[in-house]
């Protein structure tokens, strides 16, 4: 007998691959606009002038910085890896940890190379300029591979790393908790968790602009990059198998069914639903 959940699981990857393609295209478009000084960057300087003249102080500043730190790697990476390791241990499944490692490694590589290759100045310099080129990557690699030598001195502002970290971490945490291969698989809880994840993701990007750490277009690039690598992590997580059987469908013949599984018994309808715990 074929179950509806097994049928739908066959194409589980399609929306994630489509989302990955859209996010990658958006990142490419934003990068092209930044490098070419296109219309998408027109508001970068006016926004910088507005926020630079209105920097918060005291408690508002502390609050803004605290929100911005929700995208700091020293916070997001241990949380993501720790939860993934715990879920992997509880499920006896390496895929949750693989998903977190895939997302973090993809962001580290793609984010660093993009920052170095674009070579954009941050707002604090007081100048919006880019010096793109593969020679930047070569110089950066030479600096990294030469311990004790001079550090790489190029600009690396685009895209916003904090924003990308947030866009990777919080959606992936939701999938690790409530997705098909999560600790507590639950589609409804997953929808709510993903909606909630959008709050810190958006807040970090906004704060990086409000605090004048990044140009506004760099937050856009960070969101696109973070979503792309989060979807890579989701693909590494796999289709999953919650073991749940939709209500109204009988179990396969010969399969032992717990008394509280939610299937109709021989003397009447079950008293409990088939929703997973």
Image (spheres, rainbow, N blue to C red):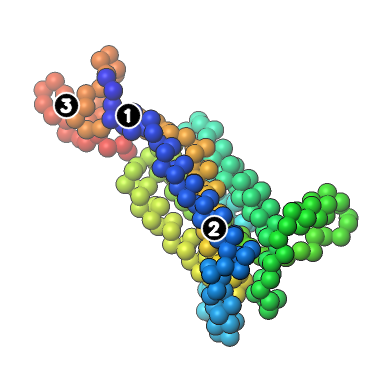
- Which dot marks residue 165? none
Image quadrant in which the N terminus is located: top left
Dot 3 or dot 1, earlier in sequence: 1
Q: Helix, strand or loop at disc 2?
A: helix
Depicted 194 relative to depicted 38: above or below: above
| Residue at image mark 1 | 7
Q: Helix, strand or loop at disc 1?
A: helix
Depicted 32 relative to depicted 258: above or below: below
Image quadrant in which the C terminus is located: top left
Can you tell which quarter of the image residue 75 is in?
A: bottom right
Asked whether 277 or 179 is in front, the reply is 179
| Residue at image mark 2 | 29
Give the side of residue 179 with respect to residue 70, left or right: left
**Could you tell me how far apart the alpha carbons at marks 1 and 2 are, in whole angstroms?**
36 Å
| Image location of residue 14, percent across then percent down | 42, 38
Asked whether 86 or 217 is in front, the reply is 217
| Image location of residue 95, percent across then percent down | 52, 35
Give the side of residue 243 with respect to residue 103, left or right: left
- Which dot marks residue 264? 3
């Amino acid at each position: 007998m074929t179950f509806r959940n097994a049928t739908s699981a066959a194409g589980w990857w399609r929306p994630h691959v489509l989302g990955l393609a859209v996010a990658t295209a958006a990142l490419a478009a934003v990068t092209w606009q930044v490098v070419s000084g296109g219309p998408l960057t027109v508001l970068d300087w006016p926004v910088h002038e507005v926020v630079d003249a209105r920097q918060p102080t005291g408690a508002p500043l502390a609050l803004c910085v605290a929100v911005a730190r929700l995208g700091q790697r020293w916070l997001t990476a241990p949380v993501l890896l720790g939860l993934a390791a715990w879920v992997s241990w509880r499920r006896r499944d390496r895929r949750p940890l693989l998903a977190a490692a895939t997302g973090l490694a993809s962001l580290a590589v793609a984010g660093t190379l993009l920052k170095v290759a674009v070579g954009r100045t941050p707002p604090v310099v007081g100048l919006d300029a880019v010096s793109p080129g593969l020679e930047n990557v070569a110089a950066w690699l030479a600096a990294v591979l030469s311990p004790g030598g001079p550090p790489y001195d190029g600009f690396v502002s685009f895209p916003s790393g904090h924003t990308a970290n947030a866009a990777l971490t919080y959606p992936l945490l939701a999938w690790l908790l409530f997705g098909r291969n999560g600790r507590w698989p639950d589609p409804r809880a997953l929808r709510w968790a993903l909606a909630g994840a959008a709050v810190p993701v958006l807040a970090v990007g906004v704060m990086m602009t409000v605090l004048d750490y990044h140009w506004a277009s760099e937050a856009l690039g960070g969101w696109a990059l973070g979503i792309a690598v989060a979807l890579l992590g989701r693909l590494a997580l796999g289709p999953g198998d919650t073991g749940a059987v939709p209500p109204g469908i009988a179990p396969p013949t010969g399969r032992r069914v717990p008394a509280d599984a939610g299937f109709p018994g021989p003397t009447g309808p079950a008293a409990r639903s088939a929703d997973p715990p």
